[in-house]
Image (spheres, rainbow, N blue to C red):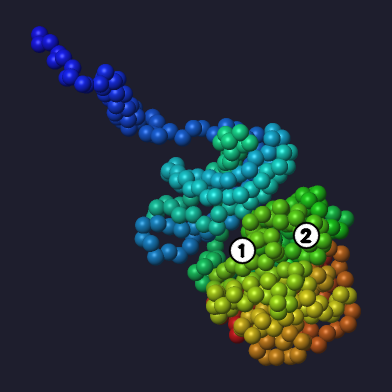
């Protein structure tokens, strides 16, 4: 047998170990890539348990098919929220929400979205589900599995428990694609000493679509305890499809800190105002508790938002009613913003603060009748103790003191309203108007 050639003069004695190291790396890479089919090439460590349970609201999230021009993918609107409850009393900062969509054939597709949710030790936190998800064309979602992940104080990846639920398909218009959509809600809602919020929440149970809240979610003050015991047990079961705005009872509690903690990302920024599109409509959710004069940050934001979102049909909503025949009378907080909205063709304002229902004819920011002005509907009827009209204001068309919800049907060039009373009341109101 031929002997191995002696080392070349000057060759390093480290060559053999180096060659062996390279060969080991090549082999390791090869077998890792080939393997036995049971593990990926770069396995992700399994996150440790965070000791945090997860639950869904509603218990079966709603799904609606949306229009798309992509023939290879189907897009679905998703409405719901997930609540995390710390049972291990360690708390966790959650940074990723993982959703696994399972179809009827058992195929699944996992999608991850970044989040920024703090679950305090022994506490709870709620976060809306992503607005939409996609699947390969021809596949229909049947169930969802949801969990969240984050790193603990030592930097270790931890995950919440997985919550799994069937999804429920709903019919109707498609947000973002101009169809007919339903927008339903009220303000001045949950007082544990009165049954009104329970009655109006049961009305919401029967009405699909997006839910709006017009502020003052809990009474007598907007504490976290009252959000948990009074609101969450009634209207809270619709949190996954709710678009909220803060009222004075919310804002008076630590500048609405419990309100923002409860609604999370659904409440927009912690400034208390944000906007979104709903069907063919653009919607501005504003904060009548914050400065709103011509030099305020909110006024400038509204001007920029309207310029960036031209729409045939637009509505705004805030808590304090600019015009009211109720005990509080006309509120001046949003007079300048009313003028700005009117000048930019906004059609409709929804408000509360008064614990009653009232509809006004079109008018300008000073209350003068104007055929091309804005209509205001006051619906402080969500469940707080009611109060009837005191001094009937000009342009007031309909008034009533009853618990109930205001159902808006929004179309591409017009809208309809219907006040639906809680059982025990016969008061109602309905009508249709065109966009300006």
Q: Quadrant of residue 13?
A: top left
Mark with earlier residue (1, 2): 1
Q: Residue at x 40, y 53 (%)?
A: 136
Q: Residue 280 in the image: x percent, y percent?
A: 54, 73
Q: Quadrant of residue 161?
A: top right
- Residue 332 sits above or below residue 52 on the image: below
Q: Between 412 and 129, which is closer to the camera in this rendering?
A: 129
Q: Residue 56 in the image: x percent, y percent?
A: 63, 47
Q: Are marks 1 and 2 in contact (CB under 8 Å)?
A: no
Name the secondary structure under disc 1. loop
Does residue 370 appear in the picture of this structure? yes
Q: Residue 417 in the image: x percent, y percent?
A: 68, 75
Task: Give the quarter of the figure containing the C terminus.
Answer: bottom right
Residue at the far left in the pictured view: 2
The residue beneath circle 1 is: 209
Graded by Cα atoms within 10 Å as few (under 14), some (14 to 19) or many (20 or more), the crowding at tag 1 reads many
Q: Between 13 and 203, which is closer to the camera in this rendering?
A: 13
Numbered circle sitting on residue 255 = 2
- Residue 265 sits above or below residue 17 on the image: below
Q: Is residue 190 left or right of residue 287?
A: right
- Residue 90 sits above or below residue 299 on the image: above
Q: Residue at x 73, y 85 (%)?
A: 365
Does residue 190 appear in the picture of this structure? no
Q: Between 133 and 342, which is closer to the camera in this rendering?
A: 342
Task: Give the quarter of the figure containing the N terminus.
Answer: top left
Q: Residue at x 68, y 71 (%)?
A: 297
Q: Residue at x 63, y 51 (%)?
A: 127
Name the secondary structure under disc 2. helix
Separation (CA) of disc 1 from disc 2 = 29 Å
Graded by Cα atoms within 10 Å as few (under 14), some (14 to 19) or many (20 or more), the crowding at tag 2 reads some
Q: Quadrant of residue 379?
A: bottom right
């Amino acid at each position: 047998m031929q002997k191995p050639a002696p080392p070349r003069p000057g060759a390093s004695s480290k060559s053999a170990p180096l060659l062996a190291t390279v060969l080991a790396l090549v082999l390791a890479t090869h077998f890792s890539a080939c393997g036995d089919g049971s593990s990926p090439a770069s396995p992700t460590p399994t996150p440790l348990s965070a000791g945090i349970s997860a639950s869904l609201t509603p218990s079966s999230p709603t799904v609606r098919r949306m229009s798309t021009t992509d023939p290879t993918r189907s897009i679905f609107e998703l409405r719901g929220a997930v609540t995390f409850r710390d049972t291990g009393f360690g708390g966790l900062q959650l940074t990723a929400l993982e959703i696994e969509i399972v179809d009827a054939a058992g195929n699944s597709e996992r999608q991850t979205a970044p989040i920024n949710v703090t679950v305090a030790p022994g506490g709870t936190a709620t976060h809306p589900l992503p607005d939409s998800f996609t699947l390969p064309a021809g596949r229909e979602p049947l169930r969802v599995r949801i969990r969240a992940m984050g790193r603990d104080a030592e930097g270790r990846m931890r995950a919440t428990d997985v919550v799994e639920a069937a999804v429920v398909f709903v019919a109707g218009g498609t947000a973002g694609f101009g169809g007919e959509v339903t927008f339903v809600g009220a303000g001045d809602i949950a007082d544990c000493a009165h049954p009104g919020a329970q009655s109006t929440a049961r009305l919401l149970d029967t009405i699909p679509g997006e839910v709006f809240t017009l502020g003052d979610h809990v009474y007598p003050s907007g504490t976290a305890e009252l959000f948990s015991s009074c609101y969450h047990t009634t209207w809270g079961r619709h949190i996954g499809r709710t678009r909220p705005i803060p009222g004075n009872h919310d804002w008076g509690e630590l500048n609405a800190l419990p309100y923002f903690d409860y609604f999370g990302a659904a409440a927009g920024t912690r400034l208390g105002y944000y906007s979104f599109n709903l069907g063919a409509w653009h919607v501005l959710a504003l904060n009548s508790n914050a400065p709103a004069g011509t030099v305020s940050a909110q006024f400038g934001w509204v001007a920029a938002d309207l310029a960036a979102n031209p729409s045939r049909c637009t509505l705004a909503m805030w808590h304090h009613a600019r015009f009211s025949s109720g005990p509080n009378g006309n509120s001046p907080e949003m007079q300048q913003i009313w003028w700005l909205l009117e000048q930019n063709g906004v059609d409709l304002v929804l408000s509360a603060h008064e614990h009653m229902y009232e509809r006004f004819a079109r008018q300008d920011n000073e209350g003068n009748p104007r055929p091309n002005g804005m209509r205001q509907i006051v619906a402080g009827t969500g469940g707080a103790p009611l109060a009837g009209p005191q001094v009937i204001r000009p342009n007031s068309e309909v008034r009533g003191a009853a618990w109930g919800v205001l159902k808006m049907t929004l179309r591409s060039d017009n809208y309809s309203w219907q006040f639906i009373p809680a059982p025990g009341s016969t008061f109602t109101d309905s009508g249709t108007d065109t966009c300006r």
